[in-house]
Amino acid sequence: MSVSGSNSRALPWALVTPALAWTCAFFVLPFIAMGFSSLTAHEGGGFTIANYSQFFTDPSYWRAMVNSLEVTGTVTVISILLAYPFAWILAEMVPERWQRLALILAVLPFWTSYVVRSYSWLLVLAQNGVVNRALIGTGLIAEPLQLANTRLATVTGFVHFFVMLLTLTIFANLKQLSPSYRKAAADLGAGPVRTFLHVVLPLTLPGIMVGAFLTFVLCIGDYITPQILGGNNELVMPQLVMMQIGRRGDFPLASALSIILMAVVTIAYLACARWLKIERA
Amino acid sequence: MTTTARNPLSNLKSHLSAACAGAALLMAAGSAQAADLNALIWCDHSDPALLEPFEKANDVKVNVKEFEGTGAGLAIVDQSQPGDWDVMVIDSIDVPRGVEKGLFEPLPEDKLPFADLFPEVKMDKSTIVDGKRYGITEKFGYNTIGFNKTKVDPADMQSLTSLTSDKYKGKVAIYDYYLPVIGMAALAIGKKTADLTEADLPALKAELLKMKANAKLVGEVTASQTALATGEVDILVGGGEWVTAGLAKENPALDFSIPKEGAVLWSQSLAMFKDSKNKDMALKFIQYILSPEGQARLATSSCYWGMPANTKAALTDEQKKILRFDEQPGFLARAQAYPAPNADLDKKMQDMWTEMLQAQ
């Protein structure tokens, strides 16, 4: 009894040990190191909270967080609005035998390098790029618009990537949805719109929220897309972090900014937590 | 070097950094062997056309690790074991930072071609510390005005005032590195780059904001080069031969000027690590890079072109023409040193740059 009891208690720990070790080595320890670093002065190495106070007192630093939240919020909302109908069409209107192919086509852009994709967008949106030439060719505009090196370009690059991610999470949720729900709603006299708004949409909210949270986390922490497409006409938080490292090697300030960014992601997680549970009733 | 007492936070940070160092080194050095040469480099040194002749001649493998920015390079060294690295490419003005950390070995001047270098680029103020030389300039150039001569009036490019004139509004890109562009702003307001102090920051900021108001983008090397090459902009503030020379064959319209106010001289040096386990080979590598053949290959590296520090570099006539080799004495006479602020002023300059980037 006692032997089998201790075995049964030890087995779960043995199974989770690799994951725990991995998390400790690659998250907990680096996080502690970053925490200590953020409380250290760049020159001299003494204890200080100056790295945090600089963020809250310097408007150009604070502005980077505002820019990050504005860009991330815009990308998340646009991506949901585009991904939901796309996922709906895939799940409901595309014949089952074509769905796998359609999904492969949907994720095809992921197969190219992220950097290459961002530079491609830069060329598409450039003054002499496809978009401007098409608009001038059709007579809609006389002079090229500034599309590249703007926030619009950054948002476009992000949306291209995250629409696919959200489509996958929403599609998976839609496929899990039993047809009986819609039949029951119809039996009770609900039309298609009412059924969607009161039955389908609430039941697919977990898929939307999982995708939205992933979009938020990946977007707010991304350095490459705003760096390539934004033209540095405004800075977002990851760019500000990188700036501290390049020449001056100010790892304490970079650490403090990274921890502030992580705090924002944690708040986002807590806001979405009820939809992010693994077990659902 | 003196050993300073360290506080508990720094000690803990060091231990945690050391714990990560082994993994970082494994990734960086790969399958390095004792006979290999391990070099911390900028991208121009990773060109096989530069490295292969040295590797074949000396039967050695050169393992390279690219980095951008002295801070990032020194961080890699911090996370490595002493002796892991043999040579390092570093901004000439930052050689003292490595010396201060006790990283570099004095170079034997009698075994290197100092007499053949352009005198103006020896950078003795930064490469010699306490009477010993720790770095040798290998390549240099100018942060100045790069432009497309078919799109702008080349006469306008002879003055820095054009960068802030309405005539070129929206046609300008700014190279995203604060020190050289702040240096150019200093030249524009009539200050010497070597004499900049904190009192100059308000005037410099005003000049930078005027440049930003005219600019379409502020881009790192690839982005600013792409913008000029694709016609997105016609002028690159901070550009020079390092942008235009490599593209000369595909786009001969790209050129650079040294305006009447002057330009900022950039230079990169090679340094040898004090703890190198392969100092003989490290010296041979430095000798090779500084040799006429090595200099020609480095100057025309696929990553970016630049002027060789050695006047005897074995460049072809066409390469010399593209680099405007024969005009160098005149250019050097008008060029001013890269700003080399102390740590406090450096931080303030970077914060000023951040403000400029965030300005709408």
Image (spheres, grey):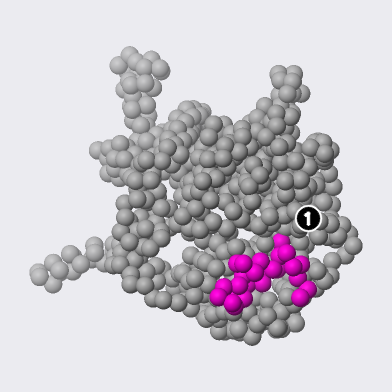
Magenta stretch contains residue B119: yes
Q: Is residue B159 left or right of residue B90?
A: right
Mark 1 element type: helix
Task: Tell me what residue is drawn at x 30 percent, y 59 percent.
Answer: A47
Label 1, residues with CA under 10 Å away: few <14, some 14-19, many ≥20: many
Q: Is residue A222 left or right of residue A201?
A: right
Frontmost residue, B46 versus A9: B46
In the orientation shown, which residue stands out farthest toward the right? B317
Q: Is residue A106 visible?
A: no
In the orientation shown, which residue stands out farthest toward the left? A1
- Whole-percent x, y for residue B125 in the image: 62, 67
A234 is higher (above) or lower (below) than A12 = above
Task: Tell me what residue is drawn at x 45 percent, y 44 percent.
Answer: A237
Which residue position holds label 1? B331
Write down the quadrant of residue B36 in the picture. Answer: bottom right
- Whole-percent x, y for residue A100 in the image: 53, 41
Magenta stretch contains residue A227: no
